[in-house]
Amino acid sequence: MGGATIKRPVQEERIARLGADNPGHDLRAGSQAVAVRRFPPPAKDAVQQSVRYAVADYAVDRIEYPAQLVDRFVPLSESHYRWQVKQSFGSGRYEFCGLADGFFVTFAETEYHTPQAAYFCSPDSLHIYLASSGDGEYVPVDGGPLSFEAPSTVLIVEPAHQPPAEVTLTGHARYIYIVVHREVLKTLYAGSAHELPALLQAFLDGDLQRTSGRALPLSAAMLRCLEDVQTCPLDGRRRRIFLQSKALEIVCQALEAFDQSECFRSVEATKLTARGVVKAQRFLEANYVTPPSLEELAAEVGLSRSALCTGFRQILGQSVFDYIQELRMQRALALLSEGDDPITQIAYAVGYNRSSSFAVAVHRHFGTTPSKLRRRGAPPAN
């Protein structure tokens, strides 16, 4: 749904969030924490989507996609499939996995040239949107918007019988979206519902009367989960099990963040830092051979040097230097395992001017020499 640059209104948007004494932010108009809307509402005839409870409703033989919308559809199992879309409004790839009744995961990487808006309903469910890039917002009926501007994690609790919300996505969006029905959450927390925040306890008891949501600060664990899903090479049943484990990990991380109210007092500041850190990650992925100085990198992503260094440690759990070393070592491992280029040439290829320095770095990282590491990755002789 959209790659166009969206100008913000002069009035600074405020991220919808809970107050310290209120475990659930009221997204309806009139709430003190209502944010400024940045996107127009969907057209009256816009697509209407609704998440159903039964996994059987998503079986491949029941899915009908208009031929003009779907470029490629690949079934992986009865309720697990991938598809690609390439249209004038944008393109993207998607993967949907129905893990169980009321427990669904969708991963997507899309490029929307203009904001794409639709009506969306996920009744009686907890839904989690985790994105490393992209923009958009979620707007319930008669309510204020909750920003999807990445990098972000958004947790929304939607009781039953709520009218469809308005959802807009735009730009290059990479995200994972998880739906956990109330009955599934009840099963997961059977006998332990008291461990949940008050809002979710009310949700499980059927006492929640309106949609509530919160923008959560990103954590290193959440970013790793998204990256793991994006790069997972597994297929078949193993991939399904992997997606289930990552979905449960994200749910646990989101509930932990939701339960720690002190995390939300600086959400706006941490979103700015997180955005800069993710931008720095991508810049370093393309420039790890000859990386910039900390000052140059900070200027490139719009942060101060101290904010960049602190953000890397808080969000990724490592320093900028360690992150560059990790990129170099992973590339070195691939080159040593997949080819027979001289070790000196590989050292230059990953940013080392001397093979001796490369050997020291490899030994520090992998606990062995480059030549032994190469032998480990070599295919067995016939």
Image (cartoon, rainbow, N blue to C red):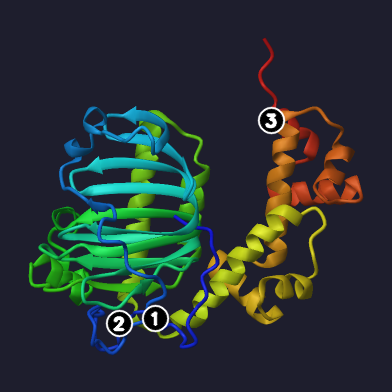
Asked if the residues shown at circle 2 and circle 3 are in contact, with their CB atoms under 8 angstroms apart, the answer is no
User: Relative to residue 300, is residue 362 depicted above or below?
Assistant: above
Which residue extends farthest left? 206
Out of 251 and 96, give the one closest to the viewer.
96
Question: Mark 1: few, some, or many residues within 10 Å (few <14, many ≥20)?
Answer: many
Q: Quadrant of residue 65?
A: top left
Give the numbered dot on residue 376: 3
Q: How many marks?
A: 3
Classify mark 2: residues with Cα within 10 Å, few (<14), some (14-19) or many (20+).
many
Q: Which mark identifies residue 153?
A: none
Left or right of 180: which side holds 329? right
How far across and down, in percent of the image, does residue 180 sit?
23, 55
Closer to the eye: label 2 or 3: 2
Residue type at numbered disc 3: Arg
Q: Quadrant of the C terminus?
A: top right
Q: Decide: marks 2, 1 in contact (CB < 8 A)?
A: yes
Q: Secondary structure at mark 2?
A: loop
User: What's the distance in space between the residues labelled 2 and 3, CA to CA?
Assistant: 52 Å
Q: Secondary structure at mark 1?
A: helix
Which residue is label 2 attached to? 18
The location of residue 87, given as percent across then percent down, is 47, 43
In the rendered structure, which amino acid carries the disc numbered 2? Leu
Foreground mark, 3 or 1, reads: 1
Residue to which mark 1 is pinned: 264
Q: From the top left corner, tell me how far across and down residue 220 is, in percent.
A: 51, 63
Q: Amino acid at mark 1?
A: Phe
The quarter of the picture where residue 56 lies is: top left
Q: Is residue 6 above or below residue 231?
A: below
Question: In the rendered view, would you say 370 is above or below 315?
Answer: above
Residues 91 and 300: in front is 91
